[in-house]
Image (cartoon, rainbow, N blue to C red):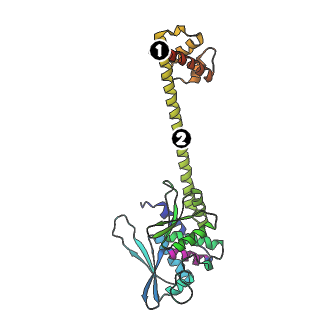
Amino acid sequence: MIDMSFSTETKNELSRVTSENHCCNVTELSALIRLAGSIQIVGYRKINLKITTELNSIARKIFKLLKQNFNINTTISVNKNQMLKRNNSYVLMVTSEMGAENLLRELGIIAPEEGFYAINKVPDSLIKHDDCTRAFIRGAFLGGGSISDPEKNYHMEFVTNNEDFAESLKNLINSLGFNCKIVARKSNYVVYLKESEQISDLLSIIGAHHALLSLQNTKVVKEMRNNVNRIVNCETANLSKTVNASVRQVENIKLIQDTIGISSLPENLQEIAQIRVECEDMTLKELGEMLNPPIGKSGVNHRLRKIEEIANELRGRENC
């Protein structure tokens, strides 16, 4: 059985998200190609568009979007990766003869006038309403995004090699109430989110509902696990504190027994001293319940402190 990463599962889910709106399909394809495509100059005023992805689900989606919205029939080829533990890559080629130049102009990736002038920002002309905004962000994630396994940490990012486009994408996402930031990584610019709540909200907006539920479930389990660990650590610390106090109290009583004798103590202190020596593992509350009449935890603690004061006084005499 293939062990898919959380990021792969999220992309596979988003690859199945469809829209009946032509404008949303065009907008999603624009973002996807922007981050996963490359332009090849093949002659005078001739360019090819090469789109590469590691997931066949994304390759199939690009194929359908091109066919249904631009009547472009392309092919999907597979590049076998000989390196171990590396996925194959799927390549779609839109040639100059197929209309690569017109496609790129309609997608807002190159300028509408003559010449190959790249537009290094989110194409405002394609963002016609909120659904288009969501579609663009979804396409950007499919083309150059990733998300960490929430079991490990919370991190969602979009990688682009253009700083102006990274800034434009960041502003688009933040216009929906998010707090994306940008960091330079080698020759790329990474737009990222790190807060689990914001990542959850963005997954919901772009349509990754199963991924959202998985993230939230993992977060709940992690919080429960952390709470249990805190409780266990707290109980362990309290138990250690109780045991250390009991050992010290027994030592005080034995010192008194070996010097002036327990019988020299007031009757109420004799009573608690005898029970404490006999029942070293009991809590102060349990000791108090064994007295006649019973007393509370603070009362037991007060008597044991009196015994400690006497023991310390005897220690002081021995050191003189």
Q: Which residue is mark 1?
A: 255
Q: Which mark is residue 230?
A: 2
Which quadrant does the N terminus fall into? bottom left
Q: How many marks?
A: 2
The amino acid type of the residue labelled 2 equals Arg
Residue 68 spot, x, y in % from top left: 56, 81
In the rendered structure, does residue 221 fall within the stretch colored magenta? no
Q: Please say if 137 is above or below 223.
A: below
Taking the spot 53% from the left edge, 45% from the top edge, the residue there is: 226
Q: Quadrant of residue 168?
A: bottom right
Along the horizontal axis of the image, is 311 left or right of 22? left
Classify 10 Å Cα crowding around label 2: few (below 14), some (14-19), many (20 and above): few
C-alpha separation, residue under disc 1 versus residue under disc 2: 37 Å
Residue 29 lies within the magenta run:
yes
Mark found first going from the N terminus, 1 or 2:
2
* x, y percent for residue 220: 56, 50
